[in-house]
Image (cartoon, helix red, strand yellow):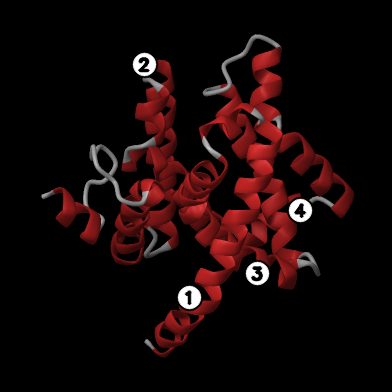
Amino acid sequence: SEWLKNIVLYDLTWSPIITIPPAWALAIEIFFYIAMPFLLSRTKQTTYIWFVISLVITISLNISGASFRNRYYPAYAASLFFSAGAMIFYYWKHLERFIPNATFAVLFFALFIPFPLIVEAFGGDRFALGYYGASLLFLPVLLWAIVSPLFKYSRVLGDLAYPMFLMHFLGAGIVRLIWGPGITGNAGMFFGLVFIVTFLLALGTHLGFERQINRIRARV
């Protein structure tokens, strides 16, 4: 039954055995990518209702003191972010006025990266204010990226980002296998080596598999 779940990406969120650890997120994505075109984001009105409901769910989870696990892993917890993406699509004309210039976009991004740690340094909860605050900081960066001349380059980064997400556990495993478990004691070196190995794995995956798959998908 566990192998079947891994093959069809069903209910992996709570599965004790996941062959590719980050694949639990794919189960959530597949759910929304099926539900969105058929119901949730089919029209502007349904998207707005979906977003409001998602916002209420998120607020309720935080007020009730739900653990970060329950605010991060289930599909209903991810609903706010998928609905926000759909809202950007439908309400783009209203959002254009909030697009920052390049300087502010860089500042927002620079603050976004360490924001959970900054919140924790001041005594806040990095899994609450740090988590949702970072998400809000990233929104103007996203809006700027969509209209930026650099967008054509961001597509290249996007092509590599997904396989890197899927491969980073494997990359860490390879580094530990070659250099030994003691390498994790040197955080900087461990991160650098894992990044390089994961990048090479992602590049190989993209060039060897994804481009061919995308050609088939484009025809569909």
- For residue 190, side relative to residue 151 (left or right): left
Taking the view exactly as shown, the residue that stands out farthest to the bottom is 219
Whole-percent x and y of residue 87? 52, 54
Q: Are marks 2 and 3 in contact (CB under 8 Å)?
A: no
Mark 4 and mark 2 lie on one chain; the one further toward the N terminus is 2
Q: Are marks 3 and 4 in contact (CB under 8 Å)?
A: no
According to the picture, the residue beneath numbered tag 4 turns out to be 99
Q: Quadrant of residue 16?
A: top left
Residue neighbourhood size for the residue with mark 4, other residues' Cα within 10 Å, grouped as few (<14), some (14–19), many (≥20): some
Q: Quadrant of residue 116?
A: top right
- Identified at 34% across, 56% down, the residue is 32
Q: Tag 2, which secondary structure?
A: loop
Mark nearest the camera among 2 and 3 is 3
Three-letter residue code for mark 1 = Glu
Three-letter residue code for mark 4 = Ile
Mark 3 and mark 1 lie on one chain; the one further toward the N terminus is 3
According to the picture, the residue beneath numbered tag 1 turns out to be 210
According to the picture, the residue beneath numbered tag 2 turns out to be 64
